[in-house]
Every structure is written in structure tokens, then in C-alpha cells.
Image (cartoon, rainbow, N blue to C red):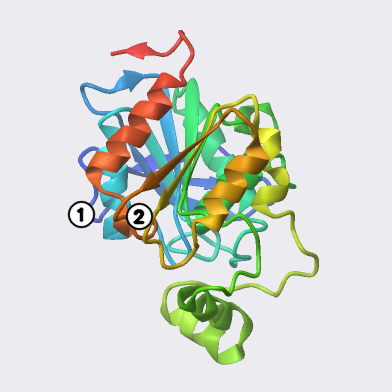
């Protein structure tokens, strides 16, 4: 991975202090995103790597709002996944983006974060689980997160048990759907030539690192079967928060919930990470 390049973002909607970052994944895809430095009351050495959902990017207002809420507590790094936003490449929707999560963790380490918590939303949730679980592309020791948070994530592939997921399947699998996906800001790559390990198959490998699974009771993409399956497969160290009234991913994550997630991440930190 090449050294990151930092500059002030042109987008005036970014949280205060936000800088644009550019790096390259381990498999050679150019990635663009943002670094939001910790606020004055943040914890020195604590970093959050945010993995956005399908069709998202670090420039989306809902994502930016979550970044700002987390940055109250620590540094935040968010890269656009391949095929999304300003990054290069094409999207695989849950497979090769594992290398993008690894690159973001390495970038956070390079920016001085000694305790890195990966926080994924929807598709990004499947990716932080798979990356911490050692799926291909997960990187070496510098890419290893210290704790993992899955928000609104799936446990398995090929979900068509909700109308929303049937629409996502149409976007990904049908020729016209792929054209529509490009209109939504996603450049889809070729269909999988192999079925990658699903989150529920690798989640047990995250232990003994802490794992938090957060899911909305009103999620219209993934039913509560998904978080319960993840926590059951992860083992006794995993924690489940079912949020009453919450729907799906970044748009449903309130500042209050983001703050609780950040506080959970801070509690997982080693003694080397101390308040500023």
C-alpha cells in the first residue's frame, strides 16, 4: 500500500477538520476517502474505520453524519469501497472489498491510531466481519483490527426474504439492474466466479477480539435472524444490541447510537490508549 496523500476536501458538507485521503488496496485498486481527526474530548490513539453500505460513499450526508458523531470520541477513517464514490475499480458486493477494509485499517495505523475499531454498515458490516475473520485479502498484522462492530449486516448471502433485498438482487444480477446501479453511483464488476465465505462462516475467527452486533428491530433489508445467527456463531464473547424502532444502516443510526458504539469501542481499548 502506498503512503496516503492528505488534502482538505472540496465538499463543504464534511465534518470540521476532514481531510481527503488517497491510498491503494493490497490488490492494486486506488481508493479515496476521508480522515476526520478526533475532537478535543476524544481518546488519543483510538481510531474508527467506517465501512459504508452498498451505493454509499464517504461523501453521503448520512455517512458524514455518522463520521462526525464517531469523531467526537476518536479519529475516523472512511474509504469509498471499490466501484463506489471516488475510488477506482468495480464493486463485487462483499468479496474483494475485504482488501479495502484492510487498507483503511493500515491507513488508520499510519495516522497514529493504536487501537482500531472497524464499524461496518450493511454491506460494509459483512466486510468488516469477513476481514476480521481472515477472508482472502484481509492483510497482515498492520491490517488486523482490535475490535469489530457490525451494524445492520447480513449473516449469509443470497438473501431474498424481504422486498428490499429482492430489489438489490435485481440490481446486481439483471442487465437492466446493473445499468440502474450505475445511475445510483455503483460500478458493478463481473459476477462471482466462486462463492466467498459468508459472514456467519468466518465470524468465529474474530475471537478473542471484541465483537458488537447492532441491528434495528424494524430493519426492512435483513430480519433479526441475521444478527442472532452471527452472535450464535461468534461465541460467548459477542454482544448483540437490538435497537427498538431502528430501521437500516447509516440512515437509521442516530447520533446517540453512534456515540454508544464509540463508547463501546473505547472500552475495548488497551491501557496504551488514554484520554487526551
Task: Using the image as rendered, state which of residue 7 and residue 64 is in the foreground.
Answer: 64
> Picture quarter containing residue 259?
top left
Task: Using the image as rendered, state which of residue 60 and residue 262 is in the foreground.
Answer: 262
C-alpha separation, residue under disc 2 versus residue under disc 1 = 16 Å
Is the C-beta separation of discs 2 and 1 under 8 Å? no
Which residue: 68% across, 41% down? Answer: 138
Which tag is nearer the camera, tag 2 or tag 1? 2
Which residue: 67% across, 56% down? Answer: 96
Q: Considering the image in quadrants, where does the C terminus appear?
A: top left
Residue 268 higher or lower than 196, as above or below: above
State whether residue 25 appears in this view.
no
Q: Residue 225 carries which label?
A: none
Tell me residue 264's x, y (percent). 39, 28
Q: How many labels does the image show?
A: 2
**Label 1 packing within 10 angstroms: few (<14), some (14-19), many (20+):** few
**Label 2 packing within 10 angstroms: few (<14), some (14-19), many (20+):** many
Q: Is mark 2 on a helix, strand or loop?
A: helix
> Picture quarter containing residue 220?
bottom left
Task: State left or right for residue 133 relative to residue 61.
Answer: right
Tell me residue 215's x, y (percent). 43, 50
Which residue: 47% across, 85% down? Answer: 180
- Which residue is disc 2 drawn over? 250
Residue 95 higher or lower than 266, as above or below: below
Task: Using the image as rendered, state which of residue 213 and residue 92 is in the foreground.
Answer: 213
- Which residue is disc 1 drawn over? 13
State whether residue 6 appears in this view.
yes
Residue 276 higher or lower than 132, as above or below: above
Amino acid at each position: 500500500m502506498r503512503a496516503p496523500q492528505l488534502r482538505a476536501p472540496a465538499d463543504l458538507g464534511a465534518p470540521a477538520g476532514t481531510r481527503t485521503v488517497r491510498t491503494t488496496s493490497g490488490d492494486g485498486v486506488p481508493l479515496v476517502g476521508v480522515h476526520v481527526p478526533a475532537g478535543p474530548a476524544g481518546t488519543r490513539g483510538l481510531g474508527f474505520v467506517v465501512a459504508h453500505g452498498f451505493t454509499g460513499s464517504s461523501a453521503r450526508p448520512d455517512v458524514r453524519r455518522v463520521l462526525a458523531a464517531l469523531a467526537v470520541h476518536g479519529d475516523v477513517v472512511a474509504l469509498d469501497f471499490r466501484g463506489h464514490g471516488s475510488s477506482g475499480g468495480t464493486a463485487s458486493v462483499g468479496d474483494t472489498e475485504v482488501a479495502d477494509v484492510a487498507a483503511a485499517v493500515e491507513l488508520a495505523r499510519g495516522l497514529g491510531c493504536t487501537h482500531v475499531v472497524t464499524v461496518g454498515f450493511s454491506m460494509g458490516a459483512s466486510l468488516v466481519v469477513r476481514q476480521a475473520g481472515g477472508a482472502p485479502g484481509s492483510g497482515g498484522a498492520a491490517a488486523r483490527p482490535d475490535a469489530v462492530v457490525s451494524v445492520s449486516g447480513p449473516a449469509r448471502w443470497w438473501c431474498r426474504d424481504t422486498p428490499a433485498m429482492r430489489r438489490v438482487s435485481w440490481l446486481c444480477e439483471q442487465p437492466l439492474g446493473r445499468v440502474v446501479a450505475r445511475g445510483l453511483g455503483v460500478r458493478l464488476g463481473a459476477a462471482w466466479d466462486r462463492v466467498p465465505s459468508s459472514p456467519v462462516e468466518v465470524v468465529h475467527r474474530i475471537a478473542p477480539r471484541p465483537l458488537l452486533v447492532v441491528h434495528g428491530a424494524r430493519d426492512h433489508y435483513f430480519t433479526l435472524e441475521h444478527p442472532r445467527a452471527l452472535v450464535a456463531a461468534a461465541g460467548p464473547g459477542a454482544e448483540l444490541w437490538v435497537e427498538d424502532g431502528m430501521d437500516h444502516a447509516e440512515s437509521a443510526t442516530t447520533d446517540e447510537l453512534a456515540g454508544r458504539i464509540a463508547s463501546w469501542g473505547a472500552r475495548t481499548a488497551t491501557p496504551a490508549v488514554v484520554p487526551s
